[in-house]
Amino acid sequence: MSEHPYLEVRHLKKYFMTPNGPLHAVDDVSFTLEKGRTIGLVGESGCGKSTLGHMIARLLDATDGEILLEGEDILKYNGRKLKDLRRRIQIIFQDPFSSLNPRKTVYNTIAEPIIIQKMCKSKKEVEDRVFEIMELVGLAERYVNVYPHELDGGRRQRVGIARALALDPELIVCDEPVSALDVSIQAQILNLLKRLQQQFGYTYIFITHDLSVVKHFAQDVLVMYLGQLVEQAPVKELFAHPRHPYTQGLLSAIPSTDIDNVKDRIILKGEITSPINPPDECRFADRCEYVSEACRKKAPQLQRLGDDHLVSCFAPLD
Amino acid sequence: MNDMLNETVNAAAEETAEVIAEEAAGINTEIVSDESENLLEVKDLTVEFHTDSGIVQAINGLSFSLKAGETVGLVGETGAGKTTTALAIMGLINCPPGFYKSGEIIYKGKDLMKIPESEYLKIRGREISMIFQDPMTALNPVMPVIDQISEVIKNHKHVSAKEAREEAIEMLKVVRIPPERADEYPHQFSGGMRQRIVIAIALACNPALLIADEPTTALDVTIQAQVLEMMRELRDNFNTSMIMITHDFGVVAETCDKVAIVYAGEVLESGTKRDIFKNPSHPYTVGLFGAIPNLNEDTEFLYQIEGLMPDPMDLPKGCPFAPRCSYAKDICHAEKPCVSRLPGEEHVVKCHKYTGSDENQEIVNEEWRDE
């Protein structure tokens, strides 16, 4: 087993059929992830980052490609094997307001996966497990019988996290877990996720559009644009030396809180174009200030620049 | 005889002209003096909502002021009362259930809380306008965007439908939307474009004061950068004053001159941007800065403000932040802190750390200094 990377995604594709042609939500994405690490998945809305996360959590089927978990293609799993897989991969959703069943109490929400997976033998054991998880995520015992509408956003997100942790998973897909929360609550949740990772060795796929959160939270970053990977690098390397013009624009767009060093920002023109039937050229070409003829002729391939730095651009920046 | 009559008429006309000129001059001087003073002053505003389950104390003695051409940022978390303040200034709070309990909203020397609705209609949209947070819901889905812009112009200026449409098309160009898309409906535009249309509506009558309620929260960073850049440009071109409501210190740093930190319906700290960013003094402000992941520093864990904002139906007796504050002493739970001045032009803070509880001292209280 050990010769395989923990998670390997190979040429993964997801096309949605629309009346106007196939929508390329995820288009030929490949990457690997080692156990116990966090990979950040960033990009603008509509770039396919959530679709990718949902495929890894097996909530969506792929059009093509492979997702290898310790060498086995989980896309081929079904029945018994798929149910077992659910124990190992869990997901935390973006919106704590719509991802909880409004008619289930906190207890029932957290206990449901435990009961479905027959993790515990008796009712008492289930109860103990629920209280153990609640304590772990910082939910007071008195909330055990309340409904989601009685809770504020931060506590709801804790319930969402508790539900994901109930089965003691290995890999957790965090789909924008803090973007609906206030800064002070965001800090509480990020600290919680980090502490849990240190304690239990979870592997995270952290999907977000907030680059400062990625900088704080992840070790490696994947930048996506219109369904494709445009750059991949360790977090420090990416923030210090972005090589793709899109990454550069994305980093430059973050409003800085440093009022003394007002940076010259690069403002990306235009907006993300349609992922329906994209032409065979660099998908960023229309917004790129360095665009040349080569970019219009065919799509660039991901190329290696340095040890862990991959860029998909004909003329990477220095 | 005729000549004499003519002369008197002429004299009378001259007199009238002089009077008009004088009046005009008078108005001018008034406007000039207004510019050096506050365009808007919110004093001790208190707004409550009476609901079946109790009284929600949404705004509790909130004060801030704004000079012509300035941008003030109202920063705070969800439920702090930022949007309610904006709606109060716009006169858009439904009474009941809302009640203006006390306070004044003085705009160009006039207390907006005392004027009749008919007068408010002339101010709203023309003098003061607002950009709402969510561009997806702020527009009418069954009306072409051009009509939504020209509607404001028609309501406030005496122009024909055709002229209003032409002006509206000019506004579309200002916010960089191709005029050939004028007759499309909101759903045909992307989020960033919709927000630009909302901005066009707000700026259509060239208001003196623009209230922007989280204008970029629903947008991607790259689009946020575009919208902010455009708002800055328009503000400078039209010399509009702005109230920027946000929870993002980055947005504040890029757009505002002054900052007010709002918590539980009060301003806990306010000052110039430099005061707040370089010398944050209230424990809540310090905590907020610590809670943001910093791009230039590496920290293992973020600073965490424990707990939650108090329930506005059941506010603490003393300082509203006391239950979450790590410096809190007995006095903080018992008494509300007064406003105290800090070094720096307009830097004020509401915290017992900086005042004696008995007197409104102007120095930092020594007792608290190194804790």
Image (cartoon, rainbow, N blue to C red):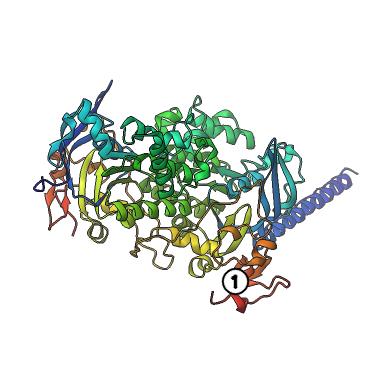
Q: Residue furthest top?
A: A19
- Residue at image position (73%, 37%) is B118
On screen, residue A238 versus residue A110, left or right, reads: left
Which is nearer the eye, B194 or B33?
B194
Which is nearer the eye, A51 or A217?
A217
Q: Is residue A62 visible?
A: no
The picture places residue B311, in percent across and down from the top left corner, at 61, 48
Q: Amino acid at mark 1?
A: Glu
Q: In which quarter of the view is residue B330 placed?
A: bottom right
Q: Residue furthest left?
A: A3
Q: Is residue A217 visible?
A: yes
- In the displayed structure, B245 sits above or below B363; it is above
> Label 1: which residue?
B345
On screen, residue B67 versus residue B118, left or right, reads: left
Q: Please tell me how many numbered marks the rendered image carries.
A: 1
Q: SS of the residue at dot 1?
A: loop
The picture places residue B125, in percent across and down from the top left corner, at 61, 41
Q: In which quarter of the view is residue B68 placed?
A: bottom right
- Residue at image position (31%, 51%) is A250
On screen, residue B19 versus residue B68, left or right, reads: right
The image quadrant where one finds the C terminus of chain B is bottom right
Please give the chain letter of the residue carrying mark 1. Answer: B
- Residue at image position (18%, 31%) is A75
The picture places residue B279, in percent across and down from the top left corner, at 51, 70
Q: Residue furthest bottom?
A: B366
Which is nearer the eye, B371 or A215?
B371
The picture places residue A57, in percent across and down from the top left corner, at 27, 36
